[in-house]
Image (cartoon, rainbow, N blue to C red):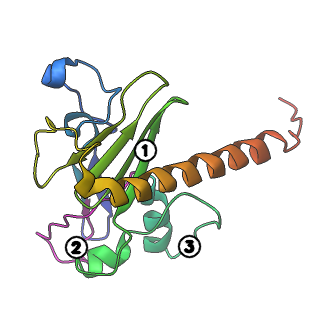
Amino acid sequence: LDDWIIIYTSDHGEMLGEHGLWEKQKFFEGSVRVPLFIRWPKAFPRGQRIDRNVSHCDLFATLCELAGLPAPSGIDSRSLVPLMRDRFATWDDTVISQYSTTNFMVKCGPLKYQRYAPGEPELLFDLERDPAERQNFLHDPIYAELLGQLRRRLDEYIAGATDRVRDYVSQPIAATAI
């Protein structure tokens, strides 16, 4: 087993009644914070805990690097290997998550900004000050500048995602014989 790269994770959590919700469709910690264990004894020491924001999308670039393969350019994935080698490595501690075409989350450090369909409230949580996600700091003037940065980051992501979808859909589909 020392030659194997073993990954243990889950695609999402469940709310199980937290915040009055039973499903995963909101970006509270009970839904989005999932275990991620990566073990490869011949390359990394055991027992490390890395408290940084990462995404399941990052697993693709990580596995490419561990396999000695180049990751394709233009993908929404970054290798976790630098963090696995040095948990204090320089890292953009921001992740963006999306559910459907209207539900988005940007998490940067301990701040988590959520935007949902029109008519639903925006949310801003500070997980250091309020780990239970009970206090919405959206209108707190202390967070005004950071909130603006999170909103801009999400708007850039949405604009880029629109371009990526348009580019993908416009590619010709090759017919194959079955």
Circle 3 residues within 10 Å: few <14, some 14–19, many ≥20: few
**Residue 23 falls in image quadrant:** top left
Q: In the rendered image, is residue 10 in sight?
A: no
Q: Which mark is residue 130?
A: none
Quadrant in which residue 175 is drawn: top right
Residue 170 seen in the figure = yes
Q: Marks 2 and 3, how far apart in space?
A: 20 Å
Q: Secondary structure at mark 3?
A: loop
In this picture, which residue range is highlighted in magenta?
38-56
The quarter in which the C terminus is drawn is top right
Q: Is residue 178 left or right of residue 19?
A: right
Q: Nearer the viewer, mark 2 or mark 3?
A: 3
Q: Is residue 110 above or below residue 101?
A: below
Q: Nearer the viewer, residue 115 or 25?
A: 115
Q: Which element is circle 2 on?
A: loop
What type is the residue that disc 3 sits on?
Leu
**Rendered residue at 86%/35% (across/down):** 176
User: Which mark sits nearer the N-terminus, 2 or 1?
Assistant: 2
Assess disc 1: are there few (<14), some (14-19) or many (≥20) residues with their C-alpha within 10 Å of its C-alpha: some
**Residue behind mark 3:** 69
Q: Residue at x 51, y 30 (%)?
A: 102
Residue 97: mark = 1
